[in-house]
Image: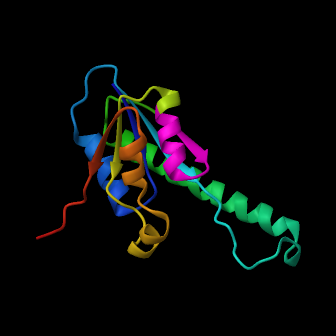
Amino acid sequence: MRVLLPIDGSQFSEAALDEVANRPWPDGSEVRIVTAAEVPMIIGLEPWAAAPIYFEQFEGAVRDSASALVENAVTKLKSRGTPLRISCAVLEGSPREMIVEEADRWGADLIMMGSRGLGAWSRLLIGSVSSAVVHHAKCSVEIVRKREAN
């Protein structure tokens, strides 16, 4: 079983990581932890208004943050003693597209992801990543919801 686990650092992707760690998997199963590093477009700032190094440093900071996110998730999963083989990657581009493309490229049997990561305003503007993945993935998709404390 090949499980793709997209994360974004939200409490919802943390719930998906917990679900992967706690579930019994068939022998030889593997998980690939990914995050999409999408550099946001800076509206209203002309390219000539800032030094080129600013944009390079900004993109580097986004990539570094994404790398730290997946490395921390790998460490957390390994600390739980999971028998899964674990790999990770930072994908560059739109999360909606990159998750579906990576699942197809890697041959995932299942995408397990959190129910949401962005706030309501961002979802309204750009749509839900989990919804897009459910509608476009060629493999099964499991959406993990974070349980609220009673």
| 137 sits to left or right of 19 | right
Residue at screen point 84% across, 71% down: 47
- In terms of depth relative to the viewer, which is nearer, 25 or 96? 96
Measured as percent of width and height from the top left, residue 2 is found at: 38, 28
| 16 sits to left or right of 33 | left
Task: State which quarter of the image contains the N terminus.
Answer: top left
Residue at screen point 42% across, 50% down: 132
Can residue 137 be seen here? yes
| Occupied quadrant, residue 128 | bottom left
How does the figure colour the protein chain or chains? rainbow
Residue at screen point 45% across, 43% down: 74
Extreme residue toward the front, this view: 135
Q: Height in image: 125 above or below 19?
A: below
Measured as percent of width and height from the top left, residue 49 is found at: 86, 78
Residue bounds of the magenta highlight: 87-103
**108 magenta-colored:** no
Extreme residue toward the left, this view: 150
Can residue 87 be seen here? no
- In terms of depth relative to the viewer, which is nearer, 135 or 50? 135
- Number of labelled discs? 0
Q: Height in image: 137 above or below 67?
A: above
**91 magenta-colored:** yes
| 22 sits to left or right of 48 | left
Measured as percent of width and height from the top left, residue 50 is found at: 85, 75
Task: State which quarter of the image contains the C terminus.
Answer: bottom left
| Occupied quadrant, residue 12 | bottom left
Residue at screen point 44% across, 51% down: 7
